[in-house]
Image: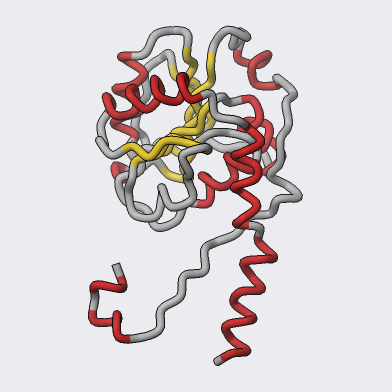
Amino acid sequence: MINISYLSKYDCRVINNGIDLSLFSPTSKDTFREKYGITKNQKILLFIANYWEDRKGLKYVRELAEKIDDSYQLIVVGDLMKQRLPENVIHIRQTQNREELVELYGEADYFINPTLADNFPTVNIEAQACGLPVLTFDTGGSAEMITQETGVKIIDKSTQGIIDALKLAEKQHFSSEKCIENSKNFEKNAQYSKYIDLYEKM
């Protein structure tokens, strides 16, 4: 957007946020499957936000829960701000620590981000670092870290758009290795060093 604004005459550089790849990495303990009685045959669709405001797309989570069959289990993490979810959705208000969050990423089959307004959500990178394909609305910078090999950019921002993306993902059979490899482009220390390099050049 900067290149079409009045700031376009200036030298603009983008330095993306980074994540700790020593923490966010593949794991599989089946802790949550056992705790919540999720069978091996069910695929886990994971949704995460600190606070589920309207712009985070909770509406689409609700609608998806009503339309999808029981071969999928939806898990929603984050404060619902007094909103409600259908009974077939597992809600975790807050993970106890980052390790528990990593376990959730590790047990899920797809990470879905139905955000309607966002800049560059690091949850998308965290998911990929744990080997998890990402399905996200093509909103703001949410799709910038997604490649054809690591997820689906959902152009149709609707519940049907999510369902269509799931169908496509099932056909694609995304590889965890490709997701992990892509996440390495956003390693936090490498990103921090870009700030230092830019500062020294200035």
Q: Is residue 85 left or right of residue 37?
A: left
Q: Nearer the viewer, residue 29 or 143?
A: 143
Q: Is residue 56 left or right of residue 183?
A: left
For the image shown, how many numbered marks are present on the structure?
0
Q: Give the left or right position of residue 169, taking residue 196 as reference.
A: left
Q: Could you tell me if residue 81 is visible in this image?
A: no
Residue lying at 67% horizontally and 37% vertically, measured from the top left: 102
Front-lying residue, 122 or 36: 122
Please report the residue visible at 53 percent of the width from the left and 46 percent of the height from the top: 123
* The N terminus, quarter of image: bottom left
Q: Quadrant of residue 185?
A: bottom right
The residue located at (50%, 33%) in the rendering is: 111
- The location of residue 194, given as percent across then percent down, is 61, 74
User: Does residue 28 appear in the picture of this structure?
Assistant: yes
Where residue 85 sits, quadrant-wise, is top left
Relative to 164, is 114 above or below?
Answer: below
Residue 92 pos. (x, y %): 54, 30
Q: How is the image coloured?
A: secondary structure
Q: Residue furthest bottom?
A: 202
Residue 9 versus residue 143 in the image, above or below: below
Q: Image height check: is 123 above or below 114?
A: below
Nearest the viewer among 176 and 90 is: 176
- Please provide percent x and percent y for residue 131: 63, 35
Residue 202 position within the rendered picture, expressed as x and y whole percent measured from the top left: 55, 92
The residue shown at (58%, 7%) is: 41
